[in-house]
Image (cartoon, rainbow, N blue to C red):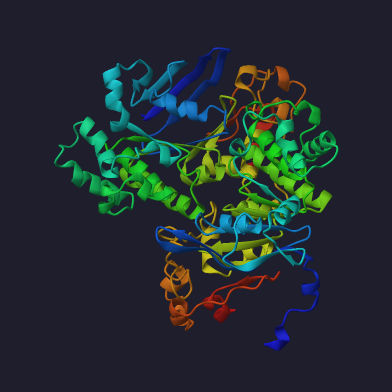
């Protein structure tokens, strides 16, 4: 096998890591049980890189994003930024949040209806005591594509369209001149025609300002539209990750294959039955085995891995830039 | 005969600031057992149109034109007749399943309610029918005893569909039935809707902003913009080869994963949907249109033929629509 190892050049194309989760676990108490919302995740976001974190509701993707922002404390493992572990003292967190900013879905919910656009965008700079507040606000609005900014300063959220509101939310994040945006479903509540414009804005911010982004979404089309890398999460773990072209056109994990197969236009559908299982009862063996179509079809047994699928815990995938899948069958069949 | 026929339907809301024309002269037909998709963005009038079909609009809405359901005009029906038609002939599945169910009643009782109201089951027998309906939508019968909060989003949407099926209607109107649902659950619900329509010979009007979902489920598509139908035709053709520039933008908004043309190139449309109280002159789409001509701001657009059973309200279709069809033939 050694002669087929990846050439060294592939490793050097990886960007310098900016934000990183290392063996991250986040647990909650849920109705008297422990919910392992994030159950061992390694993930890295490089400088100027856009990473899509894809999964269904309940898979832990939002908890992972909140933990990366320092809004949740991990039960074990670390969040690292610029090579340093995140410190949770309030002053350290405040500094951290200038660097790593959150963009929420549903701009109507994340904007205060009684605040003007100016007030909404100026809030961050004010908390952080930035000088020249008016310039900062004008600049942020212009970068978010609200031009000329003066036209928008005194408007209220209800006077704006959905796309404009989402731009205001993004401007609020940009006002602090961050290095990383963490966006949770940034276009899920927007109209179809506006969606592309907001995604194009995120690409432009990366190209012009070198911004990195972690985009949390259930939308594989979004990942195809803007992300460099994609990580697919299932029940607290990343089950497959790698460059978007590779993972989304030649998926190796049965879960990723199923997610792609239910997109409209796909030739053969694999509609998984049931809904994502409960993070308070994570199955043994491969956590996907109870819903796995490859195991159910007997193909895993043919490859001689079915016993491992049912009984043997998988290793946690490393935060590598290359394509990888946590699946015994994919490993056995290459 | 067509099951549903809309003839020049307009809906105008009268509010303090004046009149808001939400739907402006829409004509559509739907055959028995067929599925029609209505696409558009918020403010396009698509949900207003859906509500108008069963006269579910608030009082400040004025509806004109004719809405023929099985040959009978919904707009002139007596109140009692309308009540009989709702649920029994046509029922509606709303978006956001969490708000459509009463949180303090067991779901079995909620599914049984239309059956009892319409005297389609006696109180003692309703339970059996409820169990059948739950099974049809892929839920176990014991779920009848659950409360809405004990169900997931996808399960609640299945309950909504079971309610809509309860009185064996001939038409189901589904307004964004899968918005807010995860991809896998969305696929489950769409598969269910397709099966029900095929097996029970039910007609379907499905409303969504996602053209790819509509193309998947429906035979025909109508794309609405600013209260008007701007394009209609067989759904695959409208989705894969849209003729109106607005339909083109909608179709491009949801990329096909694997298509190199959309890789790192999200496609959107500049500008915003128009304010219905201040509609642009001529073709309402001209301020956002990438291929607008000098005449568009003053042009009276209508649905011009754009091929076999296709039409689009664009000057380019008027001028070249037939040529393109001939080229392909």
Quarter assignment of residue A334: bottom right
**Who's the residue at 71% across and 30% down the image?**
B288
Q: Position of residue A196 (x, y in %)?
A: 68, 43
In the image, A161: left or right of B178? right
Whether residue B323 can be seen here: no
Image vertical order of residue B104 relative to residue B287, above or below:
below
Q: Position of residue A170 (x, y in %)?
A: 71, 42
Residue drawn at 33 percent across, 41 percent down: B201
Q: How many labels does the image show?
A: 0
Q: Where's residue B38, x and y in %?
A: 51, 34
A22 on left or right of B91:
right
Q: Can residue A47 be seen in this view?
A: yes
Image position of A175 with respect to A327: above or below: above
In the rendering, at what x and y percent does residue B301 appear?
A: 64, 21
Which residue: 33% across, 27% down?
B70
Q: Nearer the viewer, residue A91 or B103?
A: A91
Residue A18 or B236: which is nearer the viewer?
A: A18
Q: In which quarter of the image is the N terminus of chain A?
A: bottom right
Relative to residue B43, is residue B144 depicted above or below? below
Residue at the farthest bottom position: A2
Residue A60 quadrant: bottom right
Task: Decide which of B111, B309 is in the foreground and name it.
Answer: B111
Choose top left, top right, bottom left or bottom right for residue B106.
top left
């Amino acid at each position: 096998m050694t002669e087929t190892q990846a050439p060294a050049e592939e490793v050097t194309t990886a960007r310098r890591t900016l934000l990183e989760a290392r063996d991250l676990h986040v647990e909650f108490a849920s109705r008297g049980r422990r919910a392992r919302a994030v159950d061992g995740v390694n993930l890295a976001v490089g400088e100027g890189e856009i990473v899509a974190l894809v999964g269904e509701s309940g898979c832990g993707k939002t908890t992972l994003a909140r933990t990366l922002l320092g809004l949740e404390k991990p039960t074990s493992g670390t969040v690292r930024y610029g090579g340093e572990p995140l410190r949770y003292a309030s002053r350290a967190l405040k500094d951290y949040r200038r660097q790593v900013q959150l963009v929420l879905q549903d701009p109507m919910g994340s904007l205060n209806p009684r605040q003007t656009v100016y007030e909404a965008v100026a809030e961050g700079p004010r908390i952080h005591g930035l000088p020249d507040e008016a310039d900062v606000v004008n600049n942020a609005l212009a970068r978010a594509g609200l031009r000329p900014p003066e036209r928008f300063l005194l408007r209220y959220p209800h006077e704006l369209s959905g796309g404009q509101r989402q731009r205001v939310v993004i401007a609020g994040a940009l006002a602090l001149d961050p290095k990383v945006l963490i966006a949770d479903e940034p276009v899920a509540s927007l109209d179809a025609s506006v969606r592309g414009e907001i995604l194009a804005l995120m690409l432009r911010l990366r190209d012009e300002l070198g911004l990195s982004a972690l985009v949390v979404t259930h939308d594989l089309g979004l990942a195809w539209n803007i992300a460099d890398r994609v990580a697919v999460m299932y029940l607290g773990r990343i089950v497959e990750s790698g460059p978007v072209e590779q993972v989304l056109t030649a998926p190796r994990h049965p879960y990723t294959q199923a997610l792609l197969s239910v997109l409209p236009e796909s030739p053969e559908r694999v509609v998984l039955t049931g809904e994502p299982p409960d993070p308070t009862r994570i199955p043994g063996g491969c956590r996907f085995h109870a819903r796995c179509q490859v195991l159910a079809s007997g193909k895993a047994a043919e490859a001689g891995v079915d016993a491992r699928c049912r009984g043997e815990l998988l290793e946690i995938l490393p935060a590598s830039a290359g394509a990888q899948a946590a699946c015994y069958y994919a490993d056995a069949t290459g | 005969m067509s099951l549903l026929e809309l003839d020049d339907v307009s809906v105008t809301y009268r509010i303090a600031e004046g009149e808001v024309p939400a739907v402006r002269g829409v004509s559509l037909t739907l055959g028995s057992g067929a599925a029609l998709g209505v696409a558009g963005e918020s403010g396009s009038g698509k949900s207003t149109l859906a509500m108008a079909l069963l006269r579910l609009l608030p009082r400040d809405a004025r509806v004109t034109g004719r809405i023929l359901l099985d040959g009978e005009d919904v707009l002139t029906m007596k109140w009692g007749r309308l009540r009989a038609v709702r649920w029994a002939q046509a029922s509606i599945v709303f978006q956001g399943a969490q708000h459509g169910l009463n949180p303090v009643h067991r779901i079995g009782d909620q599914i049984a309610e239309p059956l009892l109201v319409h005297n389609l089951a006696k109180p003692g027998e309703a339970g059996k029918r409820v169990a059948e309906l739950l099974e049809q939508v892929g839920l176990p019968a014991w779920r009848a005893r659950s409360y809405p909060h004990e169900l997931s989003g996808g399960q609640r949407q299945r309950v909504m569909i079971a309610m809509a099926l309860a009185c064996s209607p001939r038409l189901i109107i589904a307004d964004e039935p899968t918005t807010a649902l995860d991809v896998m659950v969305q696929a489950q619900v769409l598969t269910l809707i397709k099966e029900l329509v095929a097996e029970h010979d039910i007609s379907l009007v499905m409303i969504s902003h996602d053209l790819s979902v509509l193309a998947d489920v429906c035979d025909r598509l109508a794309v609405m913009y600013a209260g008007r139908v701007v394009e209609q035709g067989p759904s695959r053709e409208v989705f894969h080869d849209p003729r109106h520039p607005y339909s083109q933008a909608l179709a491009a908004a949801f990329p096909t994963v694997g298509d190199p043309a959309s890789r790192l190139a999200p496609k959107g449309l500049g500008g915003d949907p128009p304010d219905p109280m201040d509609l642009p002159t001529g073709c309402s789409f001209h301020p956002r249109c990438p291929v607008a001509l000098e005449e568009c701001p003053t042009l009276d657009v209508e649905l011009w033929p754009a091929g076999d059973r296709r039409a689009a309200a664009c000057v380019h279709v008027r001028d070249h629509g037939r040529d393109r069809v001939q080229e392909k033939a």
